[in-house]
Image (cartoon, grey):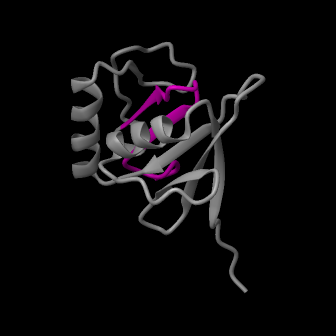
Amino acid sequence: MSVELNHTIVWCRDNRKSAEFLAEVLGLSTGAETGPFVPVVLANSVTLDFATVDEGPIASQHYAFLISEAEFDASFARIEERGIAYFADPHMRRAGEINRSDGGRGLYFRDPDGHSMELMTRRYGG
């Protein structure tokens, strides 16, 4: 049997707002609300299920998205249009830059709840 990631839950303060934020940056749409979740379905059928947490801190997580060069251009344009701060490095010290790791392009940005989102056009290691 092969093992595949089916879904993961992304904790946030407002599931609709956070799901729509990411979907908009990636050029996707959100799915129909299912119970407490607002899903964003990726091309490989993995679902990010955004769930609202009303109390307590939300631990920052990291989500990396492998996208094509054309998708990067479109997402990068949406990031710039919306004035979203972006960085070339995971520590978010190189503001306003993209990286050229492994012969591709990449960047990092934060979602409304502080999760670290990464866009990359090449897998690490080439």
Quarter of the rendering containing residue 82: top left
Q: Nearer the viewer, residue 8 or 89?
A: 8
Quarter of the rendering containing residue 109: top left
Residue 111, image x and y in percent?
Answer: 49, 29
Quarter of the rendering containing residue 107: top left
Q: Give the range drawn in magenta.
A: 106-126
Left or right side of 8 for 82:
left
Residue 112, image x and y in percent?
Answer: 50, 26
Q: Nearer the viewer, residue 84 or 104?
A: 84
Q: Vertically, is 97 above or below 41?
A: above
Q: Is residue 68 magenta?
A: no
The residue that appears at 52% across and 50% down in the rendered structure is 125
* Residue, far bottom: 1
Left or right side of 125 for 86:
left
The residue that appears at 21% across and 50% down in the rendered structure is 70
Residue 104, image x and y in percent?
Answer: 34, 44
Residue 8, image x and y in percent?
Answer: 65, 54
